[in-house]
Image (spheres, rainbow, N blue to C red):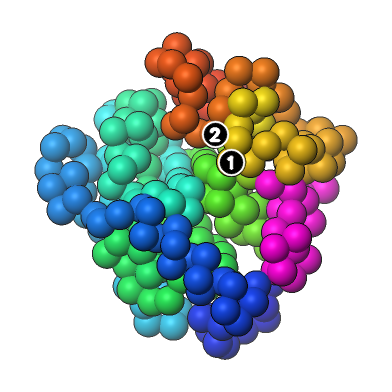
C-alpha cells in the first residue's frame, strides 16, 4: 500500500491507456443506476462517503433486521455491476442481524471520481476503517470477482477483520500489467482461518486455472476453500438451486460460529 493514500490516487497503475479503457468498458456494461432501487426494500437507505481525496461515493445500507446489530458486512461487487443491482441478494445478511453496506465504485453509477484500481482499493480501506469505528460487533467482508481483488488488497494492508468470503477472483492481476503488489495471492494473510475462497469449474469469466494459485496458497495457510464442480461465475449459475446453495454457503461461513 502507498504510505500516503491521498497522493495521486487516480493515477493509472495498470497501464496509462489500458486501465482507463478497461474500466470504461466495464462501467458501461454495469449500466445506469436505478434511482428507485432502495425504495422497494423496506430496510434499505441511500448513503454516501467522502474519500480522503474529496470524492463522494454513493451506496446503500441495509439495516439489520433485529434489535441492535451483530456487526457489519462490507460488500465489494464485480467490475461490471452497480450497488443497487445487488440489494435484493443481500437481504439474508441483514435478516441475520448485520448491517450491510455496498457502494458504487468511484466513477461508477452515482459515485464521483476516475475509475482506477489504486483509488478503489484506497476507498475500500477507508470504508472498512470508517465502519469499524462506527459499528460494534463483527467485521465481515464479501468480495465478488473484482471485488475479491479489492478486498484482498484491503486485508493485505493489515486491517482487523473477522471473516471474509472471496468468490471467483483471480490469483494475479500483474498478468494484465498491474504491479505485483496488487496481486490477490500476494495479499493473503499469514493466517487464513478467517477466509473462505470459492472457485467454480463452470466459471468462464475467471476459470479455475486463473484462481488455482490463490486457492492453493490460501488453503496452505488455513483458509477454507471450495472448488465446486457446478458453480459458474457469481449470479451466473445454471439454476436457482445452485444459486441458493452458493448463497447458503457464503452466509453460513460469514455468520457461523467464531
Q: Quadrant of the C terminus?
A: top right
Q: Image height check: is 56 above or below 100? A: below
Residue at point 56% right, 51% down?
Answer: 146
Q: Position of residue 156 (x, y in %)?
A: 71, 58
Q: Which residue is at the front of the view, 31 or 195?
A: 31
Residue at point 39% right, 31% down?
Answer: 93
Q: Secondary structure at mark 2?
A: loop
Residue at point 43% right, 76% down?
Answer: 114
Q: Quadrant of the N terminus?
A: bottom right
Q: Judge whether residue 175 is colored magenta.
A: yes
Q: Image height check: is 3 above or below 14? A: below
Q: Residue furthest top?
A: 241
Q: For the magenta stretch, what is the residue range?
A: 170-194
Q: Position of residue 200 (x, y in %)?
A: 64, 27
Q: Which residue is at the front of the view, 200 or 132?
A: 200
Residue at point 72% right, 28% down?
Answer: 225
| In the image: residue 29, left or right of residue 147 | left
Q: CA distance from mark 2 to mark 1?
A: 6 Å
Q: Quadrant of residue 33?
A: bottom left
| In the image: residue 37, left or right of residue 238 | left
Mark 2 — residue?
233
How packed mark 1 is, by other alpha carbons closer than 10 Å (few <14, some 14-19, many 20 or more), is: some
The answer to whether residue 66 is seen in the rendering is: yes
Q: Image height check: is 243 above or below 205? A: above
Q: Image height check: is 21 above or below 169? A: below
Q: Main secondary structure of the magenta part?
A: loop
Q: Nearer the viewer, mark 2 or mark 1?
A: 1
Q: Secondary structure at mark 1?
A: loop
Mark 1 — residue?
205
| N-term mark: 2 or 1 | 1
| In the image: residue 230, left or right of residue 173 | left
| Total marks placed | 2
Amino acid at each position: 500500500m502507498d504510505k500516503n493514500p491521498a497522493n495521486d490516487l487516480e493515477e493509472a497503475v495498470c497501464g496509462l491507456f489500458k486501465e482507463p479503457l478497461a474500466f470504461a468498458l466495464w462501467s458501461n456494461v454495469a449500466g445506469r443506476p436505478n434511482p428507485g432501487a432502495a425504495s422497494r426494500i423496506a430496510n434499505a437507505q441511500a448513503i454516501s462517503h467522502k474519500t480522503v481525496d474529496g470524492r463522494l461515493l454513493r451506496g446503500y445500507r441495509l439495516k439489520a433486521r433485529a434489535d441492535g446489530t451483530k456487526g457489519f458486512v462490507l460488500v465489494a461487487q464485480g467490475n461490471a455491476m452497480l450497488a443497487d443491482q445487488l440489494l435484493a441478494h443481500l437481504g439474508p445478511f441483514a435478516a441475520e442481524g448485520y448491517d450491510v453496506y455496498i457502494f458504487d465504485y468511484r466513477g461508477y453509477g452515482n459515485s464521483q471520481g476516475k475509475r482506477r484500481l489504486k483509488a478503489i482499493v484506497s476507498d475500500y480501506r477507508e470504508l472498512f476503517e470508517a465502519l469499524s469505528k462506527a459499528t460494534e460487533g463483527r467485521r465481515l467482508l464479501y468480495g465478488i470477482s473484482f471485488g475479491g481483488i479489492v478486498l484482498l488488497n484491503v486485508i493485505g494492508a493489515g486491517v482487523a477483520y473477522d471473516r471474509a468470503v472471496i468468490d471467483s477472483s483471480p490469483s494475479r492481476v500483474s498478468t494484465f500489467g498491474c504491479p505485483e503488489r496488487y496481486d490477490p495471492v500476494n495479499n493473503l494473510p499469514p493466517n487464513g482461518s478467517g477466509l473462505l475462497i470459492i472457485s467454480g469449474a463452470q466459471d468462464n469469466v475467471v476459470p479455475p486455472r486463473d484462481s488455482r494459485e490463490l486457492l492453493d496458497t490460501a488453503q496452505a495457510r488455513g483458509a477454507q476453500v471450495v472448488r465446486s464442480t457446478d458453480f459458474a461465475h457469481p449470479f451466473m449459475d445454471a439454476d436457482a438451486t445452485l444459486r441458493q446453495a452458493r448463497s447458503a454457503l457464503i452466509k453460513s461461513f460469514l455468520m457461523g460460529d467464531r
